[in-house]
Amino acid sequence: MAATLVTGVAAVFAGVALWRRVVAPGLTRARTGVTLWSLATTLTAAGVLGFAPLWLLDGCLNGFGGALFPVASVLVRVAEGVTAGVCAGVVCVPWVAELAWRRRTEPSAQRGGLAWAVRWAPPVAVAAVLALAAGTLAPGPAVAPVGAQAQAAGRDRNELLPLSVLRRDGQAPVIGDSAGRQVLLRGVNVNQLIDYGQPDPAKATVWPLEDSDYARMERYGFDVQRLALSWSALEPKRGVFDEAYLARVRTAVDQAADHGIHTVLDIHQDTFSKYVGAAPGTRCRANASPEFGNDGAPKWATLTDGAKACGFLGRDLAPNVQQAFTNLYNDTDGIGAEFARTWGRLAKTFADDPAVAGYDLLNEPGPGDAPGVTSSILLGRLYQQAITSIRAAESKVAGGFHHLVFFEPSILWSGLGFDTTPPVGFADDPQLVFSPHLYSESITMDQGLGVTLTSIEQGYATAERTARAYGAPLWSGEWGWFGEPGDFRSRFERFLERQNTEMLGSAIWVWKKACGDPQNDPEATTSGGGVVLYTCPDGKPLPSPAFETTALSQAYPRSAPGHLSSLRSSLTERDLRLTGSGEGTLDVWVPGQGRPEAKGSGLTGIRLAERPGGWRLTAHTSGRYTLHVA
C-alpha cells in the first residue's frame, strides 16, 4: 500500500510540475489550440517518472535479481506509468476540446481565465483519475467476524482441520489450521471435471475421476488437490445450476478427504471458454492462426462482440478472447455479477466443510483489451465481487466459516514470469492467499526465444515480494511442464529445492492428462505433462519417471506447530531436517516402506503410523524443536 501511494503521489506531483513549469506556459503563448497529444504526452512522462524511481528503489533494497529480470521489471513499471498517463490524458479530452474551442472563438481580453485553466486542468484531471480509482477500488467485504472462524476450531474431517491465514507479530503470514499450526499444502492439480472443447470426437478430453485416483495420490503423500471446475458445467443456463455436476464435485471432495487430502476449488478457464473457437474457413493475418476454444465460461456469458478468433503469440491473446474478458470485467449484461453469484452457490455448498481449503477465484484470467487496467484494477474489482458473494453465502449456513480465498494475477504472469496485479487493498478480507503460477524456465515465452527473463529462483523471489506487499501468504497453484530438454531433471529439482528453502507449498500441473485434451498435441504418442502417464491414443499405463516420483514423494511437514524456521528434504532419498518453534502436534509425511529413524530435540511422544506409500510421524512440541528423519 505504501509503495502504491508513493508512486501515485510521485506521478501526480511530477505531472503538475511538468505541466505548470514547462508545457502550460508554452501553450498559453502559442497561437494554435491546446492539443490532446501534448496533454497525454505530459501525463505519460509523469507516469514514467512516478514508477521508474520505485523500480530503482526496489532493486536497491531487494536486489535486481538474476538473468534479464531488471529489464523485465522496468518494462512492467514503465508500462504501468504509461497506462496511467494515457488514461489520465483520455479523461482530459473534454477539457482539451473546450479550451481549444474557446481559444479560437473568444476575444483575447477574455483569455486570462483560459491561461489559468490550462495551468490547472491537468492536476484537476489527475485528481479525477485518482478519485475514479478510489471508487473502483472501494473497500472489499467486511472482515470475518472473530466468531466465524472460532466456530470452525476443533472441527475436523479425517484429521483435516479448517484452514485460515495465521498472522503473528514479526512474522510473515502463513497458511495454517484451526490448531494454530503452519500448513504447507503440497499436492497436484486435478482436471478430470473440466468441461473441455473436444477437438477430436474420437478422443476423450478427460479421464474419469475415481476413488482410486485419491488412493494413489495418498501414496505420494499429497495433502491437497486443486480441483478444476468449469463455469460452463456449473451454470450451463443462466440462473440454473446443474445439481448433478455439483454432486460430482461433492463426491470428489469427499473422496479426497477420505484419503487425508484437502481440496482447493478452482473455477478454471483457458481461452475464456470452449465457445471462442474460430468458424470453419476463418482467415487470419500473418503470424496469427484460427483459435480453438478450450474451457471456462458458459456460452451465454461468452460475449466477444464479433472480434476475430485468431490467436497471436499464444491462444490467450486472440481478439475475441480478450474482448470476452473485457466484457466480464466490465460486467456487460451483468455477467460479472453472475460469475460472483456462481461462487456464492459453490460457497454455500461447502460453507461448513473443513476438507475444503478454500476457493481459487479464476484460473489465469486474461489481460483483456487494456492490459494494466483490465488485468489489475478491473480484475481486482471482479475478485472483490466474488469474495463478497462467497462471504455472504458462508454466513448464511449453520456452522459455516470463512475459507481461504486464493487469487491469481493474469495469464501474463504464467507466460512471462511477472505482470501487474490487482492493486493492494482491492479487498480487505483477511483470508487472502496470493497464488501465481510459477512457470519460469518452463512454458514462459522467453524460453521459445532461447533466453531467460526470469529464472526459477527469480520467479519465486518476485512472487514472494508481491505476496509481502499484499500481506498475504504465497501458494503456487500450478508449476511444472519443463518439457523434454536435457536439463528437465535439473529444473524440476531446483523448483522443489527452492520450495523447501522458502517453506512453501504448491500443486503441480497435472494429475492425469487425457489424449483428447485440447492442450495435448494431437500427434503425441503419450499424454505428456501429467504425473500419471498413458500412451496415446490407446490409453495404456506408462511408468512415471522414477526421479519425479521420488522427488514429489519427499518427506515434509504436513502441519507444524507455531512457526517453521528451516526445512531441508532430500529429493533422492529419505532425509528430512526441520526446525521450528511452537507448542502442539507436529505431523510429518515420510515416504518409503522401511520404518523411519527419527530423532530431534524439543519433541515428546514420537509416534509412527504406517500409511499407503509411507508413514505419518507425529510428536508433541513445546518451544523450540528440531527433527531429523532418515
Image (cartoon, grey):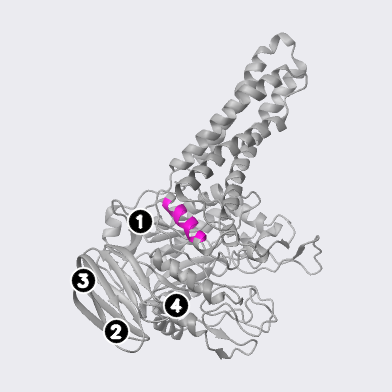
Which of the 4 image quadrants contains residue 224?
Answer: bottom left
> Please, what is the three-letter code of the amino acid marked with disc 2?
Pro
Assess whether residue 464 is covered by the magenta stretch: yes
Q: Earlier in the sequence, mark 1 or mark 2?
A: 1
As helix, strand or loop, the secondary structure at mark 1 comes to: loop
- Look at the image and give the residue range highlighted in magenta: 458-468
Which of the 4 image quadrants contains residue 594?
Answer: bottom left
Residue 173's disc number: 1
Q: Position of residue 320 (x, y in %)?
A: 70, 58
Q: Residue at x 57, y 77 (%)?
A: 529
Confirm whether residue 600 shows in the render.
yes
The crowding category of the residue bearing disc 4, from other C-alpha atoms within 10 Å (few below 14, some 14 to 19, many at least 20), is many
Residue 366's disc number: none
Q: Residue at x 60, y 44 (%)?
A: 78
- Residue pointed to by mark 3: 601
Q: Residue at x 77, y 62 (%)?
A: 287
Position of 393 relative to 590 (above/below): above
- Residue pointed to by mark 4: 552
Position of 400 relative to 492 (above/below): above
Residue 596's disc number: 2
In front here: 400 or 474?
Answer: 474
Label 4 vs label 2: CA separation?
A: 18 Å
Which quadrant of the figure contains the C terminus? Answer: bottom left
The crowding category of the residue bearing disc 1, from other C-alpha atoms within 10 Å (few below 14, some 14 to 19, many at least 20), is some
Label 1 vs label 2: CA separation?
A: 32 Å
Q: Position of residue 523 (x, y in %)?
A: 70, 81
Confirm whether residue 179 shows in the render.
no
As helix, strand or loop, the secondary structure at mark 2 comes to: loop
Q: Earlier in the sequence, mark 2 or mark 3?
A: 2
